[in-house]
């Protein structure tokens, strides 16, 4: 049972409203200084969750993460020969 999730970055105005954001998904990280939170949500429900979050007055902006759509397997990645030598030597 593997569900596809996508991250949402929620910019807010006050830290006291974090508890209200927890109910929409898995809260991973909050920044006190820059006032944003990273929340993971199922991809099937992402639009509904964004609409519900934007109804709150303390939410400034919502951005989606594009990580699930970026290819992460690199075919022509050549390792550096100097680093390989260092690893063989045990440095």
Image: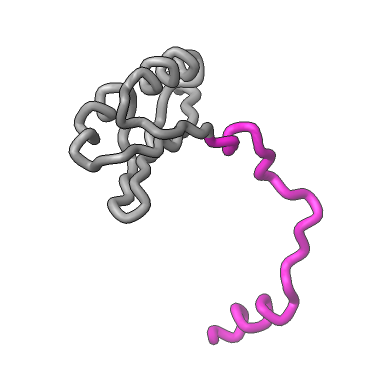
| Residue 71: in magenta span | yes
Q: Residue lying at the far front in this picture: please name it.
A: 57
Q: Residue 6's x, y, as percent?
A: 49, 29
Magenta part of the chain:
65-91
Q: Quadrant of the C terminus?
A: bottom right
Between 73 and 18, the one lying in front of the other is 18
In percent of the image, x 26 and y 29: which residue is there? Answer: 22
From this view, report whether residue 75 is shown above or below residue 27: below
- Name above or below for residue 18 compared with residue 5: below
Please tell me in which quadrant of the rendered image residue 10 appears: top left
Residue 90 percent location from the top left of the image: 54, 84
Give residue 61's position: percent from left, percent from top.
45, 33
Q: Residue at x 78, y 49 (%)?
A: 75
Give 82 or 88, whichever is nearer the viewer.
Answer: 82
The image quadrant where one finds the N terminus is top left
Q: Residue at x 75, y 77 (%)?
A: 81
**How was this image coloured?**
one colour
């Amino acid at each position: 049972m593997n569900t596809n999730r996508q991250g949402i970055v929620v910019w807010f105005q006050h830290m006291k409203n974090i508890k209200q954001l927890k109910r929409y998904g898995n809260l991973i990280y909050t920044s006190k200084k820059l006032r944003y939170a990273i929340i993971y949500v199922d991809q099937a429900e992402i639009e509904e969750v964004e609409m519900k979050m934007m109804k709150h007055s303390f939410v400034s902006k919502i951005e989606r993460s594009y990580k699930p759509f970026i290819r992460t397997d690199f075919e022509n990645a050549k390792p550096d020969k100097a680093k390989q030598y260092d690893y063989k030597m045990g440095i």
